[in-house]
Amino acid sequence: MEKIRTLRGFRDILGEDIEKFERIEGASRRYLGLLGFAEIATPVLESTDLFVRSIGDATDIVEKEMFTFTDRGGDSLTLRPEATAGVVRAYLQAGMYAKERISKVFTIGPMFRHERPQKGRFRQFHQVDVEVFGTDDPFIDAELLWMISLLLADLGVKRYSMEINSVGCRLCREEFRAVLVSYLETRKDRLCEDCLRRLYRNPLRIFDCKNTQCIEVNSESPLLFDYLCAECGSHFNSFLSHMNGFGVPYAINKRLVRGLDYYTRTVFEITSDELGAQKAFTAGGRYDNLVEEMGGQKTPAIGFAIGMERLALIVGSGERPRKPVFFFAYLGEQAKAYLAPMTKAFVDQGLPVRYSYEGKSLKSQMRYADSLNADFVLILGDDEISRKVVVVRNMKDKDQFELPLDPSGLAVELKRLFHKE
RNA sequence: GUGGGUGUAGCGCAAUGGUUAGAGCGUCAGGCUGUGGACCUGGAGGUUGGGGGUUCGAAACCCCUCACCCACCCCA
C-alpha cells in the first residue's frame, strides 16, 4: 500500500524545528507584550474577496498563488496567503476603532501560498504578524523596527540588514508613475518580457527585476523617492530621526518596493545573506489607505510580518538551562505498584519524571534512563522495599545514596536538594 | 508554470552491467539474572521511489512518472 505523505510544500514541524518556533513565538510575545500589543487569532479560511480587494488583483499572490476553492454552498473561499487582510477585517468587524484610539495587535499562525517550494519557502508557512491602527505618526514606524532589532538580538541573530524606503502616498505615486512610464517607454527594447507586461499594469515592480538588462535600465531610471510630496518627504525624514533616536542601524534603499498594492510611505525589508535566494525574513510597511478601502473610516496603519521558517534558519542555538530530570527504575510487580504514586508525587512537585513501561532488567532501564538524559535514577526493588528506602543515583558523578520510601516526602526532598531556583 | 540536481535499511552512505544489494550510526537482545555511556557478539530491518524497455543478466543504461532539494518567477 502506498504510504501517505505530506502534500508538496507542507511539512511536519518537529524536533529542533519546533523548539526554534517556540523560541521565536516566546520572544515575540514577550517584546510585543511589553510594548502593549494584544494577541488575536483570525480564521485561516476567509472569503476570496477579502484578499482580492486588499492585496490587489494584479499581484502575483492573487493571480496565481492562492489556495482558492468553491465550498459546498457555492462560495469562493481562500486559505489566507498573508495576515494583514484578515486582521484589518477583524479590526473593522469587532469595532476596535470605537474602543481605543490606537490598536496594536499581533497574530501568529500559518499562511498558504501555492508556490513551488525551495529553500525558506513552503506552501504552508508561518508568520508573526504585527499591525498598528490609528496613527500615521512616524515614531511608531521607528518603534516597530527597534522592536524587531530587540527581538533579533534576543534570538541571537547578528548578521542581517535593515533596508528602508518610502513609496509615498497616492498623490506622489500618481505623479511618479507618469514619469516612470514615459522613461521606460523610450527603453522598451531593453526590457525583458515580464517587465514589458508590468509596464502598464504595475510599473513600480520593474525595480524588483533581476534581469541584467532591466537592472541597467533601472540603474538610470528616475526614482519615486525623488518625487515624494512635501508631506511624505517630511514623514520620511521624521522617521529617520526617530530611527537615529532609537539607535537602530539601517540602510536607505531607494529602489525597495513591495509586492502588495496596499503599501504607502514607509516600507522596509530585513534580509540575511545566510538564507539563499529568499533572503527577506521580515518585511512590512505603512498602509494608510487600506482600512478605508475595506469600508472603514480613514485610518492610517502600519504592520509587518516575520517569516518564521526563514527566521528559524538563522536563529542561534539557544541552550536554555534545563531542570534536572528524574528516572524511576523499578524491579518486579511489588515495586511497580509504586509507579503511580511516585509519578503523581513528582508531577505534584513540578519535577520532570520518566520511566519505562515494561520494566525489564535494571540494566535495560539504566540504558533507557541514559538515553533520555536523566540526571538522577531512583532504584526500587524487593531489597529496598523491605528496608523501606529508595536508592538515588546521580548519573553524572555516579554517587548513590538512600532516601526513605515515601513518594510525596521523597519528591519534596529531591526538589529541595536539586531544584533550587 | 520553467530549468538543473538527487532518489539504495529508521538516518547519512557504498556497491566496473555479473552470485543471495553491503558496512557504519541508530534500534533490540545477549555478554553482565540489581546499575547507564565504552567494548564484544548476535538479531530485526530493503518492492534499490514507481512503471515500462534494452540485456543471458539492471540499483546501475534508455523512456515515462512521482517525490525531494536548489534556482527562475514572486514573496515572509
Image (cartoon, coloured by chain):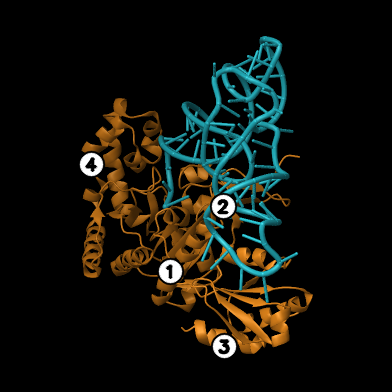
Q: Circle 1 is placed at which residue position?
A: A27
**Label 2 element class:** helix
Q: Is residue A241 left or right of residue A97?
A: left
Three-letter amino acid code of the residue under disc 4: Pro
Query: Going from the N terminus, do you reach mark 1 or mark 3 first?
Result: 1
Q: Circle 2 is placed at which residue position?
A: A49
* Label 3 Cα crowd, 10 Å radius (few <14 / some 14-19 / many 20+): some
Q: CA distance from mark 4 to mark 3?
A: 75 Å
| Residue A256, percent from left and from top | 31, 48
Query: Going from the N terminus, do you reach mark 2 or mark 1 first?
Result: 1
Q: Circle 3 is placed at which residue position?
A: A413
Query: Going from the N terminus, do you reach mark 1 or mark 4 first?
Result: 1
Q: Residue at x 43, y 69 (%)?
A: A27
Colour-to-chain, cyan:
B
Q: Circle 4 is placed at which residue position?
A: A222
Query: Going from the N terminus, do you reach mark 4 or mark 3 first?
Result: 4
Q: Residue at x 41, y 74 (%)?
A: A102
